[in-house]
């Protein structure tokens, strides 16, 4: 078995990380192979026979608002990947990020097409916008890319994946369920790459840096969860149910627990 490449340089700047990585990891190569085999076209979803149906108990504008949040999240993920790509030197890992950008662009297009059968695109919720902008700001300047990636992998993209899994069961629209299956398959690969990346980031961090990172991420999570709980009805129920399981993986990844 090939040994992972050890050419890792890690600098701490406050709470941030400036990272130059060479993975040499067979797991990343396997993800690239899966991503290349699993490519699909957004236009394929428009040719499906299923029609867009809205649950009778859910107002159309509310349904459009929920789907719109996923669209905005995909655009934020594209911005995150662009920042990440500039810090990675390993060509296999670079290819993985390039494929993720293609995936996120395709997901955004699919959500926008799906909204044509529901209602107009709704603005991003202020709480979610603040969370994404804060996470993205961690990737600016003298290296905060590791912390930015942790925010997306542990909180933002992980919660989006969790939400899609739940909504696939609650929303009876067959077209949404087919789209959901394809998107979730892609997102599972993105989360896997994020975990591999964070293994490299945190493996050389001392306990103090791990705790600092843990506290920053927990603060982001709490601000976002509590902000969304100000909503009413379905979203309040959904966010309250997600608040417990959503934060658990953070401690494991950062070494907190």
Image (tube, rainbow, N blue to C red):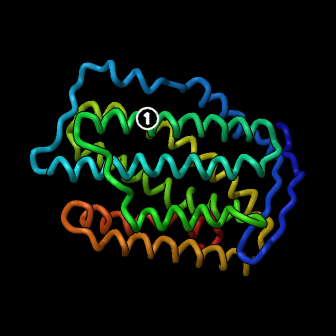
Q: Secondary structure at mark 1?
A: helix
Q: Position of residue 92 (x, y in %)?
A: 76, 36
Structural crowding at the residue carrying mark 1, measured as other residues with C-alpha within 10 Å and reported as few (<14), some (14–19) or many (≥20): some
Find residue 141 and report its image quarter.
Answer: bottom right
Q: Identify which residue is drawn at 22% across, 32% down.
A: 52
Placement of 83 over or under 178, stated as above or below: below
Q: In the depicted view, which residue is nearer to us: 103 or 161?
A: 103
In the picture, measured across the screen, residue 57 lies left or right of residue 240, that is: left
Which image quadrant is residue 199 in?
bottom right
- Apparent side of residue 16 relative to residue 20 in the rendered image (left or right): left
Name, please, the residue furthest toward the left: 56
Identify which residue, 150 or 141, lies in the foreground.
141
Q: Position of residue 217 (x, y in %)?
A: 56, 71
User: Is residue 17 rendered to the left or right of residue 177?
Assistant: right
Name of the residue lying farthest toward the right: 7
Q: Which residue is mark 1?
A: 109
Q: Quadrant of the C terminus?
A: bottom right
The total number of labels drawn is 1
- The N terminus lies in quadrant: top right
User: Is residue 168 found left or right of 44 in the rendered image?
Assistant: left
Q: Residue shown at 14%/51% (left/top)?
A: 59
Q: Is residue 41 visible?
A: yes
Q: What residue is drawn where x is 43% and y is 33%?
A: 182
Residue under the point 66% across and 37% down: 98
> How far across and down, in percent of the image, does residue 224 sit?
43, 70
Residue 187, position in %: x, y?
A: 50, 43
| Front-most of residues 33 and 10 | 10
Is residue 244 visible in the rendered structure shown here?
no
């Amino acid at each position: 078995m090939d040994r992972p490449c050890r050419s890792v340089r890690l600098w701490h700047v406050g709470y941030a990380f400036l990272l130059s990585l060479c993975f040499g990891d067979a797991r990343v190569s396997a993800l690239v192979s899966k991503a290349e085999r699993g490519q699909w076209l957004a236009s394929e979803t428009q040719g499906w026979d299923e029609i867009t149906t809205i649950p009778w108990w859910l107002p159309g504008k509310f349904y459009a608002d929920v789907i719109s949040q996923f669209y905005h999240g995909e655009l934020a993920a594209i911005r995150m990947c662009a920042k990440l790509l500039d810090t990675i030197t390993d060509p296999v890992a670079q290819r993985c990020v390039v494929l993720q950008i293609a995936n996120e662009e395709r997901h955004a297009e699919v959500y926008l097409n799906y909204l044509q059968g529901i209602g107009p695109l709704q603005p991003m919720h202020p709480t979610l916008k603040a969370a994404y902008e804060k996470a993205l700001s961690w990737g600016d300047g003298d290296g905060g890319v590791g912390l930015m990636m942790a925010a997306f992998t542990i909180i933002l993209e992980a919660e989006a994946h969790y939400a899609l899994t739940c909504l696939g069961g609650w929303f009876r629209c067959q077209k949404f369920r087919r789209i959901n299956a394809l998107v979730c398959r892609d997102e599972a690969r993105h989360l896997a790459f994020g975990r591999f990346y964070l293994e490299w980031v945190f493996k050389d961090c001392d306990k103090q840096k791990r705790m600092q990172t843990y506290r920053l991420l927990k603060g982001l999570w709490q601000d976002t969860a509590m902000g969304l709980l100000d909503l009413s009805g379905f979203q309040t129920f959904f966010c309250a149910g997600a608040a417990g399981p959503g934060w658990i993986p953070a401690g494991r990844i950062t070494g907190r627990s």
